[in-house]
Amino acid sequence: MGRENVRNVREANIRVVLNYIRRFAPTSRSQISKFTQLSPSTISSLVDQLIAAGLVKETTAPTYRGGRKPIKLYLNDKDFFSLGIEIETYYLFGLVINLVGEVIRQQRVPISPYMGYSLILEKIVQLYHELSQGLPKDGIMGLGIASPGYVDGLHGRVIYSANLNWRDVPVLEIINQGLDVPVFVLSNISAVALGELWFGAGEGHSNIICVRVGSGIGAGLILNGELYEGPQHRAGHFGHVVVERRGKPCRCGSFGCLETYVSTTQLIQRVAEGLRTGALTEVEFPSQERDECLNAIIAAGQRGDRFVLNIFEEMGEYLGLGISSLTNVFNPELVILAGGMAKAGDLILQPVRRTVSLHAFPPVPEITLSKLGANTVAIGAATKVIEEVFDNPSKITQATRNPPRVATNGTKGELAPLT
């Protein structure tokens, strides 16, 4: 076997070890060896390298019997940080997480699509600096940026976003001019799927559909434990599945798209129209702020407001029909609802479940709500950074915690190639 092949095998092995520790910590060298079928000496060598790099730590587990105390392995949850920033229509939301997905700090910044992309991207750089202030520079792994719309993650470009009124915006190129850390760009629905798989309701599952319903609708696909984005990284635009042949006009140019019937925007607009036309409802909008309006509608529905319940029932049926089609095609173990609409809980979940049970082939998958709530997209964007680090162990940036023990290849912050 040539030197390059040996290196590739070692990289694949260390990737497996690192992800095993992530999923099953606290664990041990012997447990990893049994799972991977690699020899104890190979596992010990790989684990030692990860400990030297600082990504993994070991502790002596307590024992109530005589003999040698077992050594347990964990991810280092103290020294490494990943940043994620969500671009939404009216705000930026950023946060910092550690290697086990705990949110260290977060911040929200108001924006407007009328600002233009240059100013918004400038605000992203500023938000990054504010979030990273005080963090050790060699512990920052990178920044993930999640955007609505069609996103070319491979080249870091937003091809088209109706919400932001962006066309072919070179996000990565512009952001890289202001930052000296690894930056990754992905769609908001891809971010949702990654975040839920690693740290949310999808933990422990390998085939998941994450449906995010906010001002639009997207579906993130996890197939055999991997995020599926398609050859141009543009999969997941579930909101533009046609559910009415001669239906309402959609901003995409088509008619009858799912998101013209189901979205937080449609929900607020329908309730507002009811208020204007004298519908029998107890909803009162406290302001023009979207989140406050959404919360007021949900609160009324939870109190049994029939007008609101009827709207949720109708939207749940449309959404359930769409999800039924997805489940019949992909046969997932789990469907996760996320986004602003998920705040409605059982108001939307129950009609969705009823509709799916009627139209999906059995066994019908479990349908549940996001565990990450409003943080889902930003956590997923930060997770993209960690995933890249874990999937490319020879290019782990900022990972050398003990320089004398781990030689570098001359590139700032990178480990020497694995041999």
Image: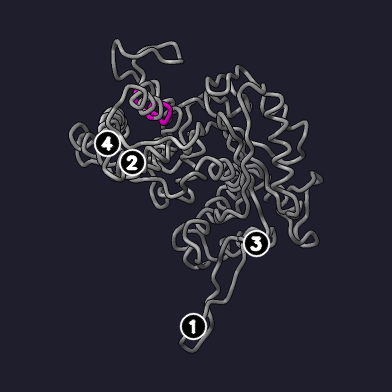
Q: What segment is highlighted magenta in the picture? A: 261-267
Q: Are marks 3 and 2 in contact (CB under 8 Å)?
A: no
Residue that extends furthest to the bottom in the rendered view of this protein: 66
Pair 4/1: label in front: 4
N-terminal label among 3 and 2 = 3
| Residue at the (46%, 37%) spot, across then down | 286
Q: Give the CA separation, mark 4 to mark 1.
A: 55 Å
Q: Nearer the viewer, residue 131 or 60?
A: 131
Q: Distance between the residues labelled 1 and 3?
A: 25 Å
- Tell me how far mark 2 sits from mark 4, CA to CA: 9 Å
Corner quadrant of residue 270? top left
The residue at the point 55 percent across, 21 percent down is 161
The answer to which of marks 1 and 3 sits earlier in the sequence is 1
Residue picked out by circle 4: 309
* Closer to viewer: mark 1 or mark 3: 3
Q: Which of marks 4 and 1 is nearer the N terminus?
A: 1
The residue that disc 3 covers is: 78
Secondary structure beneath dot 2 equals helix
Q: What residue type is labelled 4?
A: Leu
The three-letter code of the residue at mark 2 reads Ala
Q: Are marks 4 and 1 in contact (CB under 8 Å)?
A: no
Along the viewing direction, whichever of 281 and 95 lies nearer the viewer: 281
Label 2 belongs to which residue?
Answer: 300
Residue that label 1 marks: 63
Label 3 environment density (alpha carbons within 10 Å; few <14, some 14–19, many ≥20): few
- Evaluate whether residue 149 shows in this view: yes
Q: Position of residue 277 (x, y in %)?
A: 32, 22
Q: Are marks 2 and 4 in contact (CB under 8 Å)?
A: no
Mark 4 or mark 3: whose residue is earlier in sequence:
3
Q: Are marks 1 and 3 in contact (CB under 8 Å)?
A: no
Question: Which quarter of the picture shows residue 296?
Answer: top left
For the point 61% across and 59% down, the residue is 46
